[in-house]
Structure formats: structure tokens, C-alpha cells
């Protein structure tokens, strides 16, 4: 872990002007304690920079995921290199494995328009890992219409990329329901998996039914500020636009053993 | 339905004077100020971006795919905080071509796509199924255009390599419109036909295709068998939506108020019809506009007024230049394969790509000189990791074969770089239709 953190910090210092300016001198990272001495970075720091100052190599920018809701003060897309994209796929696979959903289970992804690109990526990942997947956009459909559509697909799992989850989905008879950033809700009577995602970092971890959020430790080092409880993320798989000790607008408690309790999710 | 009649039925001369000319002028000024590539281009050709727009357009050289890559990083820089999305091709120079989009681009392109979709006469009660393999992002964009027209039910239907099994579920959705790429339509056709033999699934009214050319004989066949109306959407990664068919089905309406065509080797067919390799000038693209950019299509364009009332010219795609091919709508280029196999780009070797239809899946055969046989494993691995190709191979949508032949195969006569035999596959598929 510490070697990976050290490599990322050195890389960011050498290749990303924002970090070069922020650290002022080459960081000497020998332990996690040294790492925790590094300054915290915020969206504000990114927002005042030119794009070439926050990316390690403009030539490598190959994938962009648009901002999810475009409601944050500085809506910022996720910008990835092919390596970052591959890492994101591996994180998704980690979540699938943690969920215990069997291979070839059929997924219906339901999204509203603001979350559609994001959910499209989810569908893309599911298809990539061999899960039969369909996706529909939710508009002004009535509860009956929603149930009718779910009945037509007969999926094993629902993946809901919508701002709030109406009761109708719980009546659908589908026993595995995935949601995104619904940290307050825990549905009973179904296996409810919630994905923790941050727009500029994409998905981070998954909450299993009745448990806390778990994340792959080879891709994230997560701290929480002892006073404010702000979640501070270091993304060890994001090399084009590194996020090192990045303070999110979310709050929670890092529980150790790559798990996290989330108490608040802010605007992304 | 004509979404913007004030523009779409406008007198062509008035459209040219009042809309196209000012937009071209604005484009030249922006391009000159924002891109070192364009600035250099104007200087090298002793042109002033403030000159009369049409004579300027005439004087500017045609832009190639290689030139396009010179725009990319400046476009990314220019987009700054307004960066929204990026589209990517598999790349003609071994590296994917990237088109960055700002929020303004997204809105402009969505507006144009909505205009094209309106031409397909979609209604609020339609159930549109976007049928494809892999990444659904392009369909989500089309779905947003449908949403703008009031369509409620838009579904992305991910097809797995077992077409027959995958297609079965389609019957339950009972779509009124299927939106897909021609190669997938052909591959899945027997399974689709099986479903539509049953009268209860007769709601299907339209098939919309994009990304590839649909052969006329296949088109007629599908129309007859399924009793559907077929529409074509036309566009490209670097230029976004260019146009679409209307209810008159007499060519693809090109919206010249947004994208203006120029021609390489233009020849007149009659007073109002011209043919040549088309190059596009994108007047409404915000962060990565192109000027006289050749996308590799030979089209025939008619300036005769359409029966639908639109005054915009109509295009028919004659052919695509031979440097690339498409697999289920995803473009791959000869050079990508060439550069993957031969690391020294300055002295490339021999290569021929053959696409053929197998019983279960298509086959991509890479033909190389036998002296490379000792590198077979390394070449196989490199090809496997070509962008996008990995997914198709991994999921067994087609097979990859490497074949080694004597040098004389390449030197003895002029051979085409790409041979697409899948058309014969379509013919055999057609026989299957009759069974």
C-alpha cells in the first residue's frame, strides 16, 4: 500500500503542475504518517486551475464521464486515461464480487436523464463482465407502467440510477436492488446494495445488505477528518487526474479493514 | 414532422446569405483565434479569416484525419471548465481520434439530432428499442433527442454473442421502433424474423439504422418481410449528427445550416446533383470544429426540393473509402492494425485485412508475410488489445485469425488493403430468410 501511495505522490509531483505547486518540494513518503502530513486538496483547488495543470498528460485523456447532476458549484467531469478506465472497471468488478450476485444474472438499469451517462457506464461494465443487461430511461412513468416494464424484462437485479427511489421498486418482486448514493435508505425484504460514488472519481465502494460500505484497498486510501468527519479520498487508480488526500463534500467514518460508514453525501 | 420549419423550409439562397455565411465567418474567426493548427493553415495559404467566407472556404485545403489529431489537445485546453464529454474512434493512426465536447456542443448537437429524429416521425406512444452490443452511450444521446420530442419509452437492449437467445427477449418489449446498426440487424435477422412471424408482435413500424451502410437489397428485404419503414441516420464521430431520412425516403437530409459540405473530385451528375468525396465544415461545433474535413465517404447530393417540404439538400452514401471497416457500428482503421503490427511506422510492411461471415459469427483475418510467423504470438496479443477490439473478441462477437502467406502474395499484384466479404455473408443470410 505505502509503495503505491508513494509512487502516486511522486508521479503527481513530477507530472501534475497543481500538485507540484501544492507540495512546493518533493514529498518524502516513508510511512502512512508521512503521507497524512501532505496538504489536503479540494474541488476549489482544481476549479481555479487550467485543465492542463490538473492532468498529467493531455494526450492520455481518453474517456470522459460527464458530471452526474451538474448541480455542484464547479461541475467537473471524470477524465480518464485508458489505464484509469481499466482500474475503474476492476473497481466495478470488486463491487460485483462483493455483492455475490452470480454470473450471468440479468440486470435492468433504470436511470433518469441526469444520471444516464453514468448509468450507461454501469450498463457497459455489466455487459463487459458478461451480465445480460438492459437499460431504460425513467420519465413521467406511472407506478403501474414501471411495474409493467419490469415485468417485461424479468430481471434478476435492478440497478437504479435515480435521485430518489420510490416504493414501487420494492413492490416489483425483484430481490436484488442496487442504488447509488442512497446512504440513508436501507430497504427491507430485498437485498439492497448501495454504491458510493463521487462524480469526479466515479464509483468507490459498495454497501452490502445490513453492512457498511466496503472498497478495494488497492485502489483507495480513505481517511475521515476527526473533527468534521469529511471523507478524504486518495484514488490509487487515477493517474491522469490524481486525487491525493482529496476532501469530498461527504462525511463518514473510516472504520479500517477497507470499510466506511457514510453519514452524509453532499452535492457532487 | 418538421421541427424547425423556419430553417428547414427556408429558401436556399436566403439560408446561405442569412445563416450559413455569418456562421462560416464566425467559425473562421474562432478557429483562427483558438487553434494554432488553423492559424498556421491560414498563414501558409496566405488567407485572411475576415475574407468573404465562401471564397475562403474554397481556398482552404482539405483536412485529413492526421490533421484532426492536431486539434485535440488545444480543444481540450479550450474547453476548460465547460468540458462535458468526449467521443472517440478506434483511430486511423494507431491512436484513437478524440472529439471533446463542451456543454454548448452537447446542446447544439442534441438540437440537431432532435431535428433529425423528428424527420423519422416518432410519437409519444412509440416504444424505441436501441439494440446493440457493448457501450450504450451513443444510444443514451439518441434517447435524449427522443425525449425532447416527447417519446417516453426508450430502452437500450444489450445483445450478447448468442444472438438467438438474446433476441428472444425482444418480443416481450414489443417495440414500435428498433434503432440499430446494419451489421447487427443482419446478424440477428433470422431471430428477429422468427419473432415477427407471430402476428401478436406486429407493433413494429420502423427500423432506424446508423453507423454503417445498409445495402439496398437487404433494405428492401427487411421492408417486405417485416412490413416496416426504414430510416437512416447519418453522422460521424468527428462531425456528430449530419442528417437523416424523411418520410419521402429519397435521400438523407443534410442540415447545411449546421454542417456545410465541400467536395473532393466533384463531378456533376445533372444540374442539381453532384457526386464526390465529401468534406465537412462544422459551423456549430464549439470546442473542436473542423473545416473541410474528409470523413472518408463518397456521397451523391441533390439540391432538388424534397416532397416533404424541406429545402435542405439530400445525400445518398455511395461508398466509404477503403481505409477502414466497421464491426457492429464501431469503426476500425487499416492503419491501426498496420501500426500495431509494424512498430516502425516509417517503414510499414505488408498487411491485408479480410472480413468474412461465418456460420455463427464473423471472422476477421489478418494476412501477413510469412517472415513474421515467428512473431505470431506477439502480434496476436497486440491485436487483441486494439481499442474496442478486445471486447468483441472477449465476448466472441467475431473470431480473429492470423494467416501467413508468401511475400509474392503482396508484391506480385496490387491487392486491396481491406476486403469485406461480409456482403456475401449477407447474401447467404438472405437465403436463410427464404427458408
Image (cartoon, coloured by chain):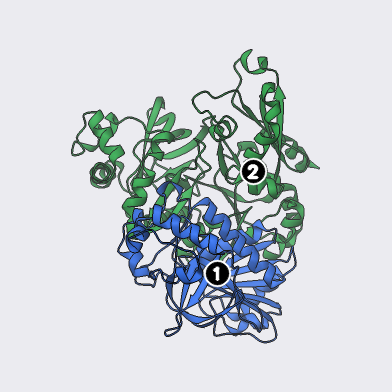
Chain colours: A blue, B green
Relative to B59, residue B192 above or below: below
Helix, strand or loop status at disc 2: helix
Relative to B23, residue B302 above or below: above
Q: Which residue is mark 2?
A: B183
Furthest residue to the right? B435
Query: How far apart, in angstroms, are the residues tagged by discs 2 and 1?
Result: 37 Å
The foreground one among B130 and B374 is: B374
Furthest residue to the top? B412
Q: How many marks?
A: 2
Q: Which residue is mark 1?
A: A204
Q: Residues within 10 Å of mark 2 (few under 14, many from 20)?
A: many
In terms of image quadrants, where is residue A185? bottom right
Q: Residues within 10 Å of mark 1 (few under 14, many from 20)?
A: many
Q: Nearer the viewer, mark 2 or mark 1?
A: 1
Q: Is residue A112 visible?
A: no
Q: Residue at x 63, y 18 (%)?
A: B410
Q: Is residue B361 visible?
A: yes
Q: Residue at x 70, y 27 (%)?
A: B374
Q: Position of residue B110 (x, y in %)?
A: 42, 57
Q: Position of residue A10 (x, y in %)?
A: 44, 57
Q: Quadrant of the N terminus of chain B?
A: bottom left
Q: Residue at x 48, y 62 (%)?
A: B144
Mark drawn on residue B142 = none
Q: Position of residue B418 (x, y in %)?
A: 60, 29
Relative to B284, residue B56 above or below: above
Task: Chain letter for mark 2, please.
Answer: B
Task: Chain letter for mark 1, please.
Answer: A
On the rendered structure, is A119 left or right of A20?
Answer: right
Q: Position of residue B216 (x, y in %)?
A: 61, 37
On the rendered structure, is B239 left or right of A116?
Answer: left
Q: Residue at x 59, y 68 (%)?
A: A217
Amino acid at each position: 500500500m505505502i509503495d503505491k501511495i508513494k509512487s502516486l505522490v511522486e508521479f503527481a509531483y513530477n507530472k501534475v503542475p497543481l500538485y507540484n505547486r501544492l507540495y512546493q518540494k518533493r514529498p518524502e513518503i516513508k510511512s502512512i504518517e508521512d503521507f497524512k502530513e501532505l496538504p489536503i486538496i479540494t474541488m476549489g483547488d482544481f476549479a481555479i486551475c487550467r485543465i492542463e495543470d490538473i492532468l498529467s498528460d493531455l494526450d492520455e485523456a481518453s474517456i470522459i464521464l460527464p458530471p452526474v447532476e451538474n448541480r455542484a458549484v464547479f461541475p467537473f467531469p471524470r477524465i480518464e486515461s485508458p489505464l484509469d478506465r481499466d482500474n475503474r472497471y476492476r473497481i466495478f468488478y470488486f463491487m460485483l464480487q462483493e455483492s455475490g450476485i452470480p454470473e450471468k444474472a440479468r440486470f435492468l438499469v433504470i436511470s433518469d436523464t441526469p444520471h444516464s451517462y453514468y448509468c450507461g457506464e454501469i450498463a457497459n461494465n455489466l455487459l463487459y463482465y458478461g451480465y445480460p443487461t438492459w437499460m431504460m430511461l425513467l420519465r413521467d412513468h406511472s407506478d403501474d407502467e414501471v411495474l409493467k416494464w419490469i415485468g417485461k424484462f424479468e430481471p434478476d437485479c435492478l440497478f437504479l440510477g435515480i435521485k430518489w427511489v420510490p416504493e414501487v421498486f420494492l413492490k416489483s418482486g425483484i430481490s436484488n436492488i442496487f442504488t447509488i448514493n442512497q446512504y440513508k435508505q436501507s430497504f427491507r425484504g430485498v437485498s439492497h446494495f448501495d454504491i458510493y460514488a463521487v462524480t469526479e472519481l466515479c464509483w468507490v465502494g459498495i454497501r452490502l445488505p445490513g453492512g457498511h460500505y466496503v472498497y478495494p484497498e488497492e485502489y483507495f486510501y480513505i481517511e475521515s477528518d476527526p473533527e468534521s468527519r469529511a471523507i478524504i479520498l486518495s484514488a490509487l487508480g487515477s493517474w491522469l487526474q490524481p486525487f491525493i488526500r482529496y476532501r469530498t463534500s461527504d462525511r463518514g467514518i473510516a472504520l479500517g479493514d477497507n470499510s466506511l460508514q457514510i453519514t452524509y453525501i453532499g452535492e457532487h | 414532422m418538421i421541427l424547425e420549419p423556419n430553417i428547414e423550409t427556408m429558401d436556399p439562397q436566403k439560408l446561405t446569405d442569412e445563416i450559413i455565411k455569418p456562421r462560416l465567418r464566425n467559425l473562421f474567426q474562432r478557429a483562427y483565434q483558438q487553434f494554432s493548427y488553423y492559424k498556421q493553415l491560414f498563414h501558409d495559404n496566405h488567407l485572411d479569416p475576415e475574407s468573404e467566407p465562401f471564397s475562403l472556404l474554397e481556398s482552404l485545403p482539405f483536412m485529413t484525419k492526421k490533421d484532426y489529431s492536431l486539434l485535440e489537445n488545444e480543444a481540450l485546453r479550450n474547453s476548460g471548465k465547460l468540458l462535458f464529454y468526449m467521443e472517440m474512434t478506434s483511430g486511423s493512426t494507431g491512436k484513437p481520434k478524440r472529439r471533446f465536447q463542451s456543454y454548448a456542443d452537447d446542446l447544439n448537437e442534441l438540437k440537431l439530432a432532435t431535428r433529425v429524429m423528428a424527420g423519422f416521425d416518432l410519437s409519444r406512444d412509440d416504444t424505441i428499442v436501441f439494440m446493440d452490443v457493448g457501450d450504450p452511450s451513443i444510444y443514451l444521446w439518441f434517447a435524449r433527442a427522443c425525449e425532447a420530442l416527447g417519446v417516453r419509452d426508450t430502452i437500450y437492449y444489450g445483445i450478447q454473442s448468442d444472438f438467438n437467445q438474446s433476441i428472444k427477449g425482444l418480443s416481450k418489449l414489443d417495440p414500435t421502433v428498433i434503432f440499430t446498426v446494419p451489421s447487427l440487424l443482419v446478424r440477428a435477422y433470422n431471430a428477429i424474423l422468427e419473432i415477427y412471424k407471430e402476428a401478436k408482435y406486429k407493433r413494429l413500424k420502423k427500423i432506424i439504422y446508423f453507423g454503417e451502410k445498409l445495402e439496398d437489397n437487404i433494405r428492401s428485404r427487411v421492408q417486405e418481410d417485416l412490413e416496416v419503414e426504414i430510416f437512416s441516420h447519418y453522422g460521424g464521430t468527428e462531425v456528430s449528427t449530419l442528417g437523416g431520412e424523411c418520410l419521402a425516403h429519397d435521400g438523407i437530409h443534410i442540415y447545411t445550416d449546421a454542417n456545410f459540405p465541400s467536395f473532393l473530385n466533384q463531378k456533376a451528375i445533372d444540374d442539381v446533383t453532384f457526386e464526390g468525396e465529401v468534406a465537412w465544415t462544422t459551423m456549430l461545433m464549439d470546442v473542436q470544429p473542423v473545416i473541410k474535413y474528409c470523413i472518408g465517404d463518397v456521397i451523391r447530393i441533390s439540391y432538388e426540393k424534397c416532397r416533404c417540404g424541406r429545402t435542405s439538400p439530400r445525400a445518398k452514401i455511395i461508398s466509404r473509402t477503403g481505409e477502414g471497416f466497421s464491426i457492429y457500428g464501431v469503426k476500425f482503421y487499416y492503419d491501426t492494425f498496420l501500426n500495431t503490427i509494424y512498430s516502425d511506422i516509417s517503414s510499414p510492411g505488408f498487411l491485408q485485412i479480410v472480413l468474412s461471415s461465418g456460420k455463427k459469427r464473423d471472422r476477421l483475418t489478418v494476412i501477413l508475410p510469412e517472415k513474421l510467423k515467428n512473431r505470431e504470438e506477439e502480434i496476436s496479443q497486440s491485436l487483441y488489445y486494439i481499442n474496442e477490439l478486445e471486447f468483441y473478441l472477449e465476448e466472441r462477437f467475431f473470431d480473429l485469425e492470423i494467416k501467413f502467406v508468401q511475400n509474392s502474395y503482396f508484391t506480385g499484384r496490387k491487392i486491396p488493403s481491406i476486403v469485406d466479404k461480409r456482403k456475401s455473408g449477407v447474401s447467404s443470410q438472405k437465403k436463410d430468410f427464404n427458408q
